Image: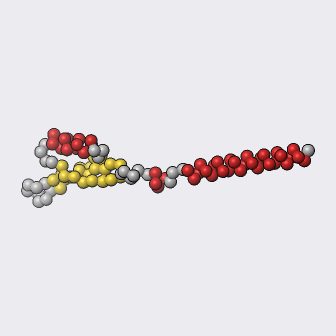
Amino acid sequence: MELRKLAATVIALTVVALVYQSANGLAQNQPNPIQAAQQWEYKTQELPIGGELAEQESLNKLGEKRWELVTITFHQTVPGMAGSVYYATLKRPKER
């Protein structure tokens, strides 16, 4: 009878050890949330002022290169004077 209790205890401890090692191994293989976060590359580009079609073509070309439009800002150099410019701020996933 003692031998059966001893064998059962050894088996139970072995199972507990295997479960612990398995769980510990899974935890170590989990990606670090900081490292797994998407990294972005940003770019600011002047947009041509030549009507809607010129802006669309420029943005479509950037889109083909995986750039995504974030915002467009208007910069007026001197109020009421020529020289005003539109800038597009773009982002795309950073290569790792």
At x 22%, y 43%, the residue is: 61
Residue located farthest toward the bottom when viewing the structure as drawn: 78
Whether residue 11 sits left or right of residue 38 in the image: it is right
Residue 75: image location, x then y, percent = 17, 56
- Whether residue 80 is visible, yes or no, is no
Q: Is residue 37 visible?
A: yes
Q: Residue furthest top?
A: 53
Which of the two residues, 46 or 66, is positioned nearer the viewer here?
66
Structure colour scheme: secondary structure
Residue 45 x/y as whole percent: 22, 52
The residue located at (39%, 52%) in the rendering is 96
Return the residue nearer the eye: 68 or 7.
Answer: 7
Q: Nearer the viewer, residue 34 or 19?
A: 19
Q: Residue furthest right?
A: 1
11 lies above or below 82: above
Tell me which residue sits at (15%, 48%) in the image: 48
Q: Quadrant of the image for the N terminus?
A: top right
What is the x, y in percent for residue 64?
A: 27, 41
Residue depicted at x 78% and y 46%: 11
